[in-house]
Amino acid sequence: MKVDLWPVDGMPPPTTPSRWRRFIERYLPMVVVYLMVATLVAIVLYPHMVVTVPSGYVGVLWKRFGGGTVLDPRRLKNEGFNLILPWNEVFLYDLRLQSFTESYNAISSDGVNLTATVIVRFRLQRNAVPVLHQAIGPNYVKVLAMPGIGSLTREVIAQYNAEQVYSTARQEIQDKIRSLVEARLSEKMMEHEDDEESYRVPLRDIFILYDILVTGIELPEAIVAAINRKTEQYYIAEEYKFRVEREKRESERKKIEADGIRDFQQTVSQGISESYLRWRGIEATLQLSQSTNAKVVVIGSGKDGLPIILGNVDTPAPPAGSTPPSGNDANKESTTAAGPAVPLEKTPAAGLATPAEKIPPVISGASSAATPEASSRSWWPFSLSDIEAYLFQTVRPAEPKTEARPR
């Protein structure tokens, strides 16, 4: 049986604390201090111990107390999270496709100063990055690439004149620059001699050259204007050449056409006779007279009685300088009454001849049977006497009129 003793004041006796509680109560201040110190050290050393390599990059390790640059490609820092000692460093290099644009001053073969703009696209070899870092460093574009390509660009442009560089030879210049750059990369070596490590690496094993593009050529404005004028004159001359060629072709065409017309006329003339042409004229006259349109059919005065349009070609033309016959002489055979013997003003109205009746026109087929007088009347219904009587009555209406005979 266990007996508990109670104090006289009635309070329970104090209990003894556990071992862990006594340890925490004793060492807690020191643990807090150590954690604070460790946190502070981690915050301070984090940028120097943790390296994050971005996508497409690779890190070259440099040891402060381990011999400097680590040339072993297997010890390169890959993408992602990497821990290093705080006294070491990691240098990042981009392995993706890179490009830079640079303008170079050059002189053409004819002494024209110009500016060429060049774009270079390249990529780095992964295993050669440590050598590149040790030999040249991260500033390899300005130190190695730009000066070397600029020198080769000036060398190539000096082989062409300003017009070729500006217009026709740009692609050729571009290809030559790339060929020279590739040859120069094969010739140049990156060398390092040391007791521990030595190497001799050509530049073509470090750089992978994709292409070199000549994007622009800038010439003085006066030179550009002169080249444009020359080009314009060249095309004008080419235009005249085509014009001359076209005229030659046109002359050949006309010659062939003339030969064809000549052959046609020779062929047709053998089958066309005078009787055939007369028959065609009669048919044309009949078609004109039977047409329902308003018309005037004029019968010709030739020997065949064809229309004037078709059959008047055999009427001799009056000689030059001769005067045409007067109205009375020309119409003696075409009127039924002779003209007045006295002047027109003194002839009374009763003495004027009555106008001849209108005689219907006679077609060419019946002209051979008609008299010359009927043939002459067929193409004009009034005589000269009728016209003179009408004019006399119009001019002198006040004179007394005698009864005219009926018409």
Image (tube, rainbow, N blue to C red):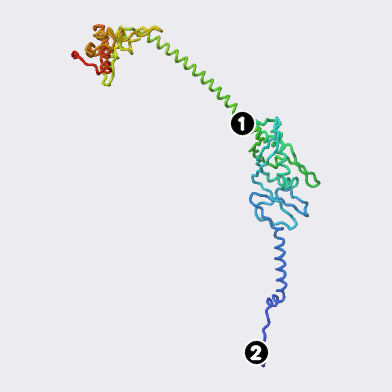
Q: Image quarter for residue 224?
A: top right
- Mark 2 residue type: Met
Check the image and name the residue furthest to the front: 399
Residue 103's place in the image compared with 279, above or below, is below
Residue 228's disc number? 1
Q: Name the residue located 22 percent from the left edge and 16 percent from the top edge.
A: 400
**What whole-number distance in Å separates the C-alpha atoms at marks 1 and 2?**
117 Å
**Image position of 242 (left or right of 263):** right
Nearest the viewer among 115 and 172 is: 115
Crowding around mark 1 (Cα neighbors within 10 Å: few <14, some 14 to 19, many 20+) is: few
Nearest the viewer among 319 and 272 is: 319
In the image, residue 191 lies at what x, y percent?
77, 42
Q: Earlier in the sequence, mark 1 or mark 2?
A: 2
**Image position of 164 (left or right of 295):** right
Residue 287 seen by the camera:
no
Q: Quadrant of the N terminus?
A: bottom right
Residue 21 seen by the camera:
yes
Q: Image quarter for residue 374?
A: top left
Say how many tags the image has. Answer: 2
Residue 11's disc number? 2
**Image position of 107 (left or right of 358):** right
In the image, residue 404 lies at what x, y percent?
19, 14
In the image, residue 320 lies at what x, y percent?
41, 7
In the image, residue 40 lies at what x, y percent?
71, 65
Q: Name the residue located 54 percent from the left edge and 23 percent from the top edge.
A: 242
Kindly state the secondary structure of the residue where label 1 is placed: helix
Check the image and name the residue furthest to the right: 195
Crowding around mark 2 (Cα neighbors within 10 Å: few <14, some 14 to 19, many 20+) is: few
